Image (cartoon, grey):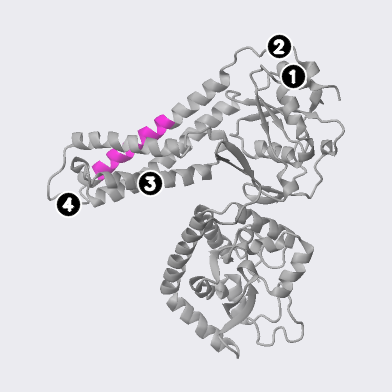
Amino acid sequence: MKPLMQTLGNDHFLPADDRLERGSLRETVLLILVDMVMLEAAFLTTYWFRFHSGIWLVPLGVPPLSMYLVASLVVLLVFFGIFYFSAMYTRRGVRSFEDDLVGLFKGVVLASLLVLASTFFLRTLTFSRSFFGLFFLSTFFFLTLGRVGARQLAKRWTRGGEGRIRTLLVGASPMRERLLRLTRELPGLAFEPVGWLRVDGGDEDGPLEAGVTLLDARGPRRAASAVPALPCLGGVEEVRSLVLEHRIDLVVLTVPFDRLPLISQVAAALANLKVDLQFIPDLPALHTSKMRLQEIGGIPFISIREGALSAVDRIVKRTFDLLASGLGLLFLAPALAAIALLVKLSSPGPVFYRQERVGQDGRQFSMVKFRSMRTDAEQASGPVWTTEDDPRVTGIGRILRRFSLDELPQLWNVLRGDMSLVGPRPERRVFVEQFTRQMPRYFERHRVKAGLTGWAQVNGLRGNTSIEDRTYYDLYYLENWSLGLDVKILLMTLHHVLRGENAY
């Protein structure tokens, strides 16, 4: 390979080009203005609905609008501060609509709590409880409506070529294919791949093999063979001249870890040019879904693998499990009693079926379910998975399995602390030992409590499906846990239960 530094030239500087800065500034201003207008609209709508619609009595008279307008300025300032520190005004292209919804919900909750707290200190800002409740609901609605409109307008700008980030890729690791796929799946993403550069002497220049499992923001996915080809513009030694020729804004290195010296070489070759340089680590090679950067005493630490949940994460998750499982058992008690009666009347044997499963850190626990099979189901076959149209399943059991109602008694396991509402589904020890031999990282899924439902299950991996794929999804869940992800999985579970995918 020709030394990269030989491509340097003292007279090669990119001319000043502020189109990206203009596009980013315009998009940020748009988001801020839309949010503020929608917040004010929500505030005024709530004022009219509460005091002039005639639905609520106003025994103390209608408060002056001027007082509420002054109060609304304080509310706007609080919301802007929350959204700013929550990074809600970063480039829209790198945020999905779901990210916006989650961010808006968190911001509205936190900002509303701050506004409510401020009323205890500033009596002039005191709102009635009904006004505050209406404002909370209307705010999320108006902000969501505004974001939809702003995203559509920004997307139109991007499709028109404004604010596009002309991107040059170096290398051909699986991460390059993922980035290319992402730019095609998210039309609003501002990246515009222009081409890629080969790295001589490395196997990474070959195409991504079909069927390779990748971990991305939605979990592992099979590599798609339909990703359109990106033109190869030359070798990495030509990076400087090609950046100048094609007016590149961003150079992205997608090379395996054994080619890391290229980072410093490419950086030197691009010296004095107005171009960003970024490196995407080869995460599939590490069997991980993300890397985290933190600074301790001025020293950057890149975390490749961490403990599944921090201490505060465990407290939050356990508190959520206790509240949700306790309320679930309370409200579902009549339904549980009815199911128990149906099971008892449908076939001889006990109502509940208990089975030893492997939970957190390899500890065994007794998992309880409504019995859905004959009592001698495994007497002849031994431990085997259930198959579709399994003759061992009873009539009522087939209905229970179709809607996952046989799993409801596991709320008791959650309440006891054996399980969590969300986590990797537990298996019997014989299967755990078998799968651990097949997949070296399989046992890592036991770093957290087993779940009533999980990230793999809501992505269609229930029953007799690929253990490899299920393991990758479980590992993704461990490395990306948040309370929001748990709530998302529970909501997705309701959808998938109604569809009955792989439920047998």
* SS label for mark 2: loop
Whole-angstrom CA distance, mark 4 to mark 3, is 29 Å
Q: In this picture, which residue range is highlighted in magenta? A: 32-49
Task: From the image, give the main secondary structure of the stretch colored magenta.
Answer: helix
Front tag of 3 and 2: 2
**Residue type at the position of mark 4:** Leu
Residue 377 position in % (x across, y down): 70, 84
Q: Is residue 481 left or right of residue 377?
A: left
**Residue type at the position of mark 3:** Leu
- Residue at numbered disc 4: 57
Numbered circle sitting on residue 12: 2
- Residue at numbered disc 1: 240
Residue 48 position in % (x across, y down): 24, 42
Front tag of 4 and 2: 2
Relative to 189, is 358 above or below? below
Q: The C terminus lies in which quarter of the figure?
A: bottom right
Q: The N terminus lies in which quarter of the figure?
A: top right
The residue under the point 58% across, 70% down is 404
Front tag of 4 and 3: 3
Residue 188 position in % (x across, y down): 58, 34
Q: Quadrant of residue 192?
A: top right
* SS label for mark 4: loop
The residue under the point 71% across, 45% down is 283
**Residue type at the position of mark 1:** Arg
Q: Does the segment drawn in magenta span residue 279? A: no
- Residue at numbered disc 3: 110
Relative to 475, is 19 above or below? above
